[in-house]
Image (cartoon, grey):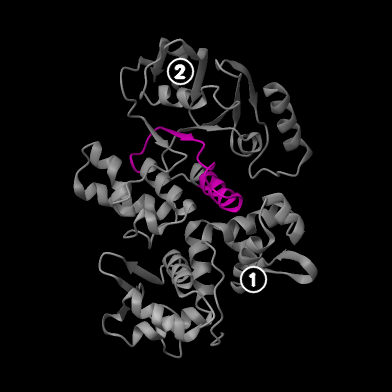
Amino acid sequence: MTLLELERVSKRFGALSALEEISLVVGEEEFIAIVGPSGCGKSTLLRIMAGLIPPSSGRVLLEGRALDGVNYETALVFQSFALLPWLTVQANVELGLEARGVPLEERRRKAAFYIDKVGLEGYEEAYPRELSGGMKQRVGLARALAVEPKILLMDEPFSSLDALTAISLRELVLDLWADPQVPVAACVMVTHLIDEAVELADRVIVLSPRPGRIVAEVRIELPRPRDKRAEAFNGYIDRIFSLMA
Amino acid sequence: MDDKVDPLPNTGVNRIFGLLELLDDHGGREDIYRLADELGYELGELLAVLKAAEMLGFLETPGGDALLLPLGKEAIEGDTNLKKAIFKEQLQRLGLFRHFVAYLKKREQRSASREEVLEELKRLLPQEDPEETFETLVGWGRYAELFGYDTDEDRFYLDQVWVSGPASPGGLE
């Protein structure tokens, strides 16, 4: 089933063309990665999906209906975590729920559930300044999941983390994706790392340099957990790299 | 069980589990220099993570290699709750954590201020930076749900009830 559809979406910022004629379907149970060189409009595309910025031309359809304004069926995970430093972990996770008018008791219950899911039980009263980058991104994930979006959007979620922490967080995302208690129907992740896209995604969308256009879509036909040293895994990396080059 | 109080490497839980995952991707054994090179880490930086994982019983380092142990494999294959349970179990074997459980148990409300804990750390580990050790103690302790720290109230506390009976020596309720 189609959750989100972009029909010939273009985006201009003044004279600058950021995206051109993007047509893309996000289906149920799909993990999609969008890769492309810096400045190709990957993050802009994600924000259009979230309804945070409108396309200059083309249409965004949410379950068949034209999207007008914020897409409340999505939640975003940011590269820079975007936590409020004066709020505790618990309060940061509750923030999105509060903004959507969820009553206090339900906020507490949902926040506790997702704090537990991302392994942050025990950190509820901590402030972001007390946390490592990896733990901050766990808060970012819990905050996004707590609003129970149909589509989880992640903008370079591991780019600010050191290599070992990023490995750990990628495993967490895969665990959450496989968890039947987490009701996310689709994931769209922007990354500049091809190996990360091949490790996580079912389908990789390759964008051209600015203005971003879809160069290719590559379906990753590898079972999970994926063996990163396998020939087939590296074959996908080579193929996507050559498409980007 | 170890009543000797060894210093803690200043590293975080995510890095420890990340290293175990990486080792598993390498078939469970890899040369330490190669791992450092692949990660783009300074060797000293990687050694701190290796030391932490070794103290916790997740790996060994024979002859310049890192070798994933069955407990490390079990931890990375488990879900979040199993990871935390194994981590907690292993923390209870470390002298410093055992010391602070006993230390907090003796105190009113099973808690102490940050300054009091820093003083105790200076006494126990005079060669170590107490601020760094406190950070690791709180970070690992929170993950294991063994210790909590409330910065607003400046209260470092036992997150669970410690049992000292013969049926569960040194275990947690």
- Give the chain of mark 1: B
Q: Residue at x 32, y 25 (%)?
A: A70
Left or right placement of residue A221 versus residue B148 in this view = right
Left or right placement of residue A202 versus residue A29 in this view = right
Left or right placement of residue A64 versus residue A178 in this view = left
Q: Looking at the image, can residue A27 be seen?
A: yes
**Are the numbered discs 2 and 1 placed on the same chain, yes or no?**
no
Q: Residue at x 35, y 80 (%)?
A: B116
Q: Which residue is mark 1?
A: B54
CA–CA distance in space, label 2 to label 1: 49 Å
Q: Residue at x 64, y 71 (%)?
A: B54
Against B105, is A120 above or below? above
- Amino acid type, residue under disc 2 in the picture: Glu
Q: Which residues are magenta?
A: A146-175
Q: Which residue is mark 2?
A: A5
Residue B25 x %, y %: 70, 51
Nearest the camera: B85 or B26? B26
Query: Badge 2: few (under 14), some or many (20 or more) residues near its Cα, within 10 Å?
Result: many
Q: Which mark is residue B162?
A: none
- Amino acid type, residue under disc 1 in the picture: Glu
Residue A72 x %, y %: 32, 29
Look at the numbered disc 1 and give the secondary structure of its residue: helix
Against A88, is B95 above or below? below
- Give the chain of mark 2: A
Q: Residue furthest bottom?
A: B166
Query: Badge 1: few (under 14), some or many (20 or more) residues near its Cα, within 10 Å?
Result: some
Nearest the camera: A83 or A3? A83
Q: Residue at x 64, y 26 (%)?
A: A219
Quarter of the picture holding the C terminus of chain A: top right
Against A245, is B21 above or below? below
Q: Looking at the image, can residue A1 be seen?
A: no
Residue A191 x %, y %: 56, 33
